[in-house]
Image (tube, rainbow, N blue to C red):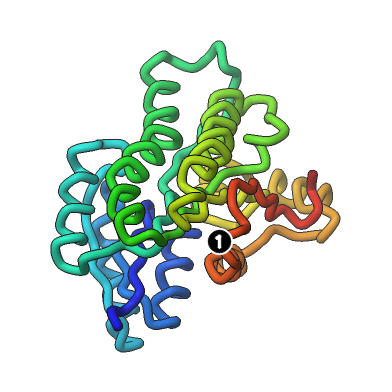
Amino acid sequence: MKPATILITGASRGIGRAAALRFAREGYHVAATARTDEEGLLRLSDDISAMHGSCRTFLADAASYSDMESVIGALLQQWGHIDILVNNAGIASLGLFTDMNPSDYEQLISVNLLSVLHCCRLTVPSMVEQKSGRIINISSVWGIAGASCEAVYSASKSGVNGFTRALAKELAPSGIAVNALACGVIDTQMNRAHLSGDELEELAEQIPAGRLASAEETADAMWQLSRCPVYLTGQIIAFDGGFL
């Protein structure tokens, strides 16, 4: 029996890195991508090797169809199949929409939404052929509720949610589950880069759970979702400590 395989985009740090380590511990062959963080990918590869796991890393832009075509082509050639695709690559931007340049919001939409479309378009045919597979899209509660000063980010994640629901209907007859994990405030480097310590504390006070989630428990939620029956599909699962 061939080992199970997983491809995670944006995996050099944060949620993606935690997910890569979690699935590696469970015996998965892990493929991880990052756009520029080569050092982070090397650290991830070393950490997985230290636990006697299997890992391939790629410096590739998830928003580039040609980059991901090369990555996924190489993986299918070596492994023959990709069992789980985790679309995790994403960026954030804080500020008024009218203060954003068109190039800024075009990039945000490209990274947060087009990357999901690209990776699914390239991975789905092999999943359909084997009549199995799981796609987990990392979304946000702001894609459900919307957030002031994060209008384009909210729009991109709302797009991910709509795409998740629609693609799930297309792929259900092939035994492929497509779901989104709509994250609340996760304690990641990206959030700490955009929010001050005081702002993070204020957010934590608004969350019924009383704290931010860790990247590791978010990865555990992904693992649990990957274990669910494929009948669970087309769902936008809020992982937010009761925030919404």
> Residue shown at 39%/36% (left/top)?
111
- Asked whether residue 19 is in view, the answer is yes
In this picture, residue 145 sits left or right of residue 166 = right
Q: Secondary structure at mark 1?
A: loop
Number of numbered discs on residues? 1
Residue plotted at (17% across, 53% down): 73
Q: Nearer the viewer, residue 173 or 214?
A: 173
Q: Is residue 60 left or right of residue 148?
A: left
Quadrant in the rendering for residue 8: bottom left
Q: Residue at x 68, y 35 (%)?
A: 144
The answer to which quarter of the image holds residue 46 is: bottom left
Q: Which residue is mark 1?
A: 230
| Residue 207 vertical position relative to residue 44 in the rendered view, above or below | above
Residue 220 position, x and y percent, is 58, 70
The quadrant in which the N terminus is found is bottom left
Q: Position of residue 24 (x, y in %)?
A: 39, 77
Give the x, y percent position of residue 39.
Answer: 26, 62
